Image (cartoon, rainbow, N blue to C red):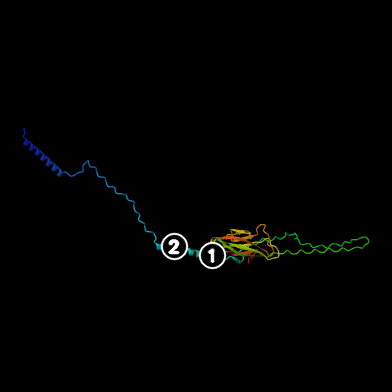
């Protein structure tokens, strides 16, 4: 049996040896996180909305003012040019025009056929003397039949025409014009038929007419009375209008009525 003193010495020796081993282990090992300790979660940074920085304006205030001034000046120049063009156009009113380059001739009356006598006024035939007798009276000489008076000549019409620019048409008056032709009868007889011929610059056409019917062939336009139109009385007149569209359309270059130049 061991003595109590010896057992205490053995126990203290074992305990010292264990303590030294623990110190050696602590000095040789690296501190590692314990498996039981939870891993730290990564810090979440707050998401902030991006702040918009105001961009620099593409134009400065001076550039905006200059642009406005330029627009005003350009508009003024355009309007001034348009009015200048209007001023250069012929004003409305009567215009003297020469004969057209080509005047179509009107068909003449056909002469009577050969061998056919033309009708002429028949003069009265002097009647034969007849004696009328009455009982107990001598013969009474018959009075001669007077010759019929010759028929009076038919009064002729004398037509004249004049052209006038009635109005400017289209935007700002630059899109065409309306012309007016007046036919006057200065003769002693009525005129039931007439023909007015106008020549226009190349490329222009009459779009419509009022008071007359028309037909165009190239640059020549022929106007005649409407169907059923009344005759032009002596000292009277008739008028018709026509429209010619086109930018800065030119005036007629010639005018004639029945081959006579317009006044």
Q: Nearer the viewer, residue 179 or 114?
A: 179
Label 1 Cα neighbours within 10 Å, binned few <14 / some 14-19 / many ≥20:
some
Q: In this view of the protein, can residue 180 be seen by the observer? A: yes
Q: Earlier in the sequence, mark 2 or mark 1?
A: 2
Classify residue 16 as left or right of residue 93.
left
Q: Which mark is residue 134?
A: none
Q: Residue at x 11, y 39 (%)?
A: 15
The quadrant in which residue 54 appears is bottom left
Counting from the top left corner in percent of width and height, residue 155 is at 72, 64
2 vs 1, front mark: 2
Q: Residue at x 44, y 62 (%)?
A: 68
Q: Residue at x 12, y 41 (%)?
A: 19
Question: Which quadrant holds the C terminus?
Answer: bottom right
Q: Tag count in the figure? A: 2
Question: Which quadrant holds the N terminus?
Answer: top left
Q: Mark 2 touching mark 1, by CB under 8 A?
A: no
Counting from the top left corner in percent of width and height, residue 34 is at 21, 42
Counting from the top left corner in percent of width and height, residue 152 is at 75, 64
Indicate the secondary structure of the residue bearing disc 2.
Answer: helix
Label 2 Cα neighbours within 10 Å, binned few <14 / some 14-19 / many ≥20:
few
Residue projecting furthest to the right: 136
Q: Nearer the viewer, residue 202 or 211?
A: 211
The quadrant in which residue 230 appears is bottom right
The quadrant in which residue 178 appears is bottom right
Q: In this view of the protein, can residue 104 be seen by the observer? A: no
Write down the residue under mark 1: 86
Counting from the top left corner in percent of width and height, residue 237 is at 66, 63
In space, the residues marked 2 and 1 are separated at their CA atoms by 27 Å
Q: Residue at x 8, y 37 (%)?
A: 8
Classify residue 218 as left or right of residue 7.
right
Write down the residue under mark 2: 68
């Amino acid at each position: 049996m061991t003595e109590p003193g010896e057992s205490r010495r053995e126990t203290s020796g074992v305990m010292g040896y264990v303590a030294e081993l623990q110190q050696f282990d602590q000095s040789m090992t690296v501190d590692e996180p314990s498996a039981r300790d939870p891993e730290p979660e990564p810090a979440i940074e707050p998401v902030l909305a991006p702040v918009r920085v105001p961009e620099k304006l593409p134009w400065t205030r001076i550039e905006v003012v200059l642009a406005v001034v330029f627009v005003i000046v350009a508009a003024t120049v355009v309007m001034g040019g348009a009015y200048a063009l209007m001023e250069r156009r012929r004003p409305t009113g009567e215009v003297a025009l020469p004969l057209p380059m080509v005047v179509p001739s009107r068909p003449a009356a056909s002469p009577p056929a050969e061998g056919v006598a033309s009708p002429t006024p028949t003069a009265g035939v002097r009647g034969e003397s007849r004696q009328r007798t009455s009982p107990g009276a001598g013969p009474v000489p018959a009075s001669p039949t007077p010759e019929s008076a010759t028929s009076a000549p038919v009064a002729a019409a004398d037509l004249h025409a004049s052209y006038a620019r009635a109005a400017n048409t289209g935007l700002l008056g630059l899109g065409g014009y309306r012309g007016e032709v007046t036919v006057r009868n200065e003769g002693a007889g009525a005129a039931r038929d007439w023909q007015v011929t106008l020549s226009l610059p190349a490329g222009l056409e009459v779009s419509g007419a009022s008071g007359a019917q028309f037909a165009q062939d190239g640059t020549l336009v022929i106007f005649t009375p409407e169907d059923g139109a009344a005759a032009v009385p002596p000292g009277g007149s008739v008028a018709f209008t026509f429209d010619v569209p086109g930018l800065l359309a030119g005036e007629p270059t010639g005018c004639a009525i029945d081959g006579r130049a317009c006044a």
